[in-house]
Amino acid sequence: MEDEIYENADYPDSVNAAPLKNQTGPRISESICRAVVFCLGLLSVFLLAGLIGVSVHCHVSLSGPAADLSTINANLTERLQAREDELSSVSSERDRLNATLTEKTKELDRLQLLSKQSHVSLSGPAADLSTINANLTERLQAREEELSSVSSERDRLNATLTEKTKELDRLQLLSKQKKTCPAGWKMFSCSCYLLSSANGSWEAGRQDCRDRGADLMIIDSYEEQEFITRFIKRRTWIGLNDRDNEGVWKWVDGSPLTEAYWYRGNPDNGGGDPEWGEEDCGEILTDQYVRVNWNDVSCDSDLQWVCEKMR
Ligand SMILES: [Ca+2]
Ligand SMILES: [Ca+2]
Ligand SMILES: [Ca+2]
């Protein structure tokens, strides 16, 4: 515009060159041209001022919304970030679902294949196989029940065996114990014998034997008579008396006297001598005559005694 203005400004100068040859006309034209140039220059100044004003106004008016734009930009950035996050999350979910779908598809294929195979294999002899299977299952069940029953029987027998073994051991131990005599007792044949260390009446001696699980000795064989004769060193009570019925001798177990070894003249019940009194209890004398060493004597006599018990 300014160039245009100057071009217009130059034009009158170029026009002025020719009219210089004419002195009156050109002077008026020159004044008009100067006025026009002045007006144009003034107009240019106004236009320039207007442009500057507009420019300044625009600059001022843009400084206001700059802050708003920054906020909007920040908001948009934030929302964009949120959207991106959301997208990332959705993508992950999609990938996960895809993986599950793939897995399920494979499982379905496998099941379908299996179903197809089963269908093919069972389609022919399905009934027979089913029957055979049922039979086998039944037989297996029967065998298992039988096995269970046999196992129970075996356990029962084992328990009984254990019990019987214990009983046997106990009896063997008892038998072994019975085969020997207690300490201090003398063993002969099937019996054990104990000579007392103290003296006493026939009744006191018998009580002592009973307290030991025995009784006064019963002599029922010549061998036993011979044994006790060698065993004793002094007069000794034996389990023989006629207290209940004078002259009728019996052993402490109630058995009658069938084989006797009385010293000569005995039993004499004291021989009628009041000094000796009644003689109702039996003793073995120290006499070494084995076949004749028994005597009847007062039951209150003070003698040792011999106990006997089965071993
Ligand atoms: Ca005996
Ligand atoms: Ca008598
Ligand atoms: Ca006598």
Image (tube, helix red, strand yellow):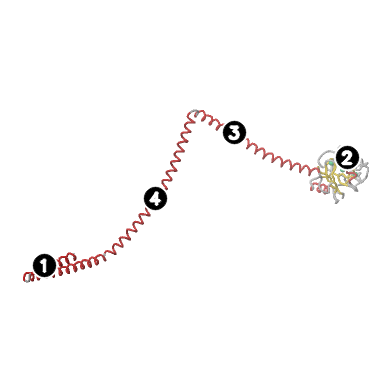
Disc 2 to disc 3, how far (Cα)? 68 Å
Question: Sequence-wise, which precedes: disc 1 or disc 3?
Answer: 1
Q: Residue furthest left?
A: 24
Q: Position of residue 74 (x, y in %)?
A: 33, 61
- The mark found on residue 18 in the picture is 1
Q: Which residue is denoted by mark 4 in the rendering?
A: 91
Q: Could you tell which of marks 2 and 4 lies nearer the N-terminus? A: 4
The residue under label 2 is which amino acid type? Glu
Mark 2 secondary-structure assignment: helix
Q: Which mark is residue 97?
A: none
Amino acid at dot 4? Ser
Which of labels 1 and 2 is toward the front? 1
Which mark is first along the chain, 3 or 2?
Answer: 3
On residue 223, which mark appears? 2
Residue of label 3:
143
Query: Mark 3 packing: few (<14 Cα in 10 Å), some, or many (20+)?
Result: few
Q: Position of residue 281 (x, y in %)?
A: 86, 44
Ligand 1 within 8 Å, label 4 CB: no
